[in-house]
Image (cartoon, grey):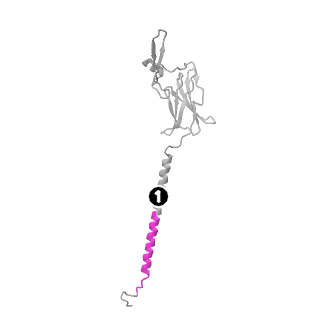
Amino acid sequence: MTPNNRHSDVTGVTVDYKICDYDLCVAQEESCQDIAAKMGCLCPGNTLESVPPHPPHVTGVSLAESGGVIVKWCAPFSSVSQYRVTTATENNEGQSQVFEKMFRNATLEGVKVGQRVCVQAVNRAGSSPLSEESCSTYRPEKHANAPLVAGVVAGGVGFILLLSVTALILWRRKACCKGRADNSQGLRNPSFSTDGTL
């Protein structure tokens, strides 16, 4: 919670000003101005609608569970009517989508590795300029469980090899024993009886 600001007016009375509990990086159902009107709190200083907004701050571009790419950003200290999210390559090939002012993230489809994703704040005076903070290049991270998956695969392959070697050893042993039994029976002469007579 943001601490209250204390201010003494000309009458010497100390007045507490509470800053509105409003997160610029989280999607909001109400604007800070609406919250201020209901709660009697103060919003951070925003530029007017007659001034183009400052650039938003992109906080992440990552792979979404749906298979698309999710872009997250924080709002600027400006009056914003909507956000424009664009993707582009070095050849400026890409797409552009518009989102309402309460949005702080968007899921995009068809974004390729290496594409630059930018978010611009828009109001009636114009669009925010592109900056390093308002753009990010999509470079998906390696899967966090990749070492675990590799270990499971290696263990499975090792287990199959162990079973194969064991089966081979048992098969050769059985074949060897069978060969010895056949040889020992082949040395007997059936023309002689056990009592020594022909």
Give the class, few, some or many, for how many residues have Cα within 10 Å of label 1's Cα (few <14, many ≥20): few
Q: Residue furthest front?
A: 12
Instruction: Please tell me whether residue 103 is drawn above or below residue 189 in the rendered image.
Output: above
Q: Residue at x 47, y 62 (%)?
A: 164
Q: Position of residue 105 (x, y in %)?
A: 50, 31
Q: Amino acid at mark 1?
A: Ile
User: Which image quarter holds the N terminus?
Assistant: top left
Question: What predominant SS class does the magenta segment belong to?
Answer: helix
Q: Position of residue 121 (x, y in %)?
A: 55, 26
Q: Is residue 184 magenta?
A: yes
User: Which image quarter holds the C terminus?
Assistant: bottom left
Q: Nearer the viewer, residue 103 or 192?
A: 192
Q: Position of residue 154 (x, y in %)?
A: 49, 53
- Residue position for label 1: 160
Q: Is residue 182 magenta?
A: yes
Q: Residue furthest bottom?
A: 197
Q: Residue furthest left?
A: 195
Q: Residue at x 47, y 58 (%)?
A: 160
How many numbered callouts?
A: 1
- Would you say 152 lies left or right of 119 here? left
- Would you say 91 lies left or right of 190 here? right
Instruction: Please tell me whether residue 9 is drawn above or below residue 153 in the rendered image.
Output: above
Q: Nearer the viewer, residue 120 or 97?
A: 120
Q: Residue furthest right?
A: 91
Q: Position of residue 89 (x, y in %)?
A: 61, 36
Instruction: Please tell me whether residue 149 is drawn above or below residue 5 in the rendered image.
Output: below
Instruction: Please tell me whether residue 53 is drawn above or below residue 181 in the rendered image.
Output: above
In what element is the residue under mark 1?
helix
Q: Quadrant of residue 128?
A: top right
Span highlighted in magenta in the image:
166-190
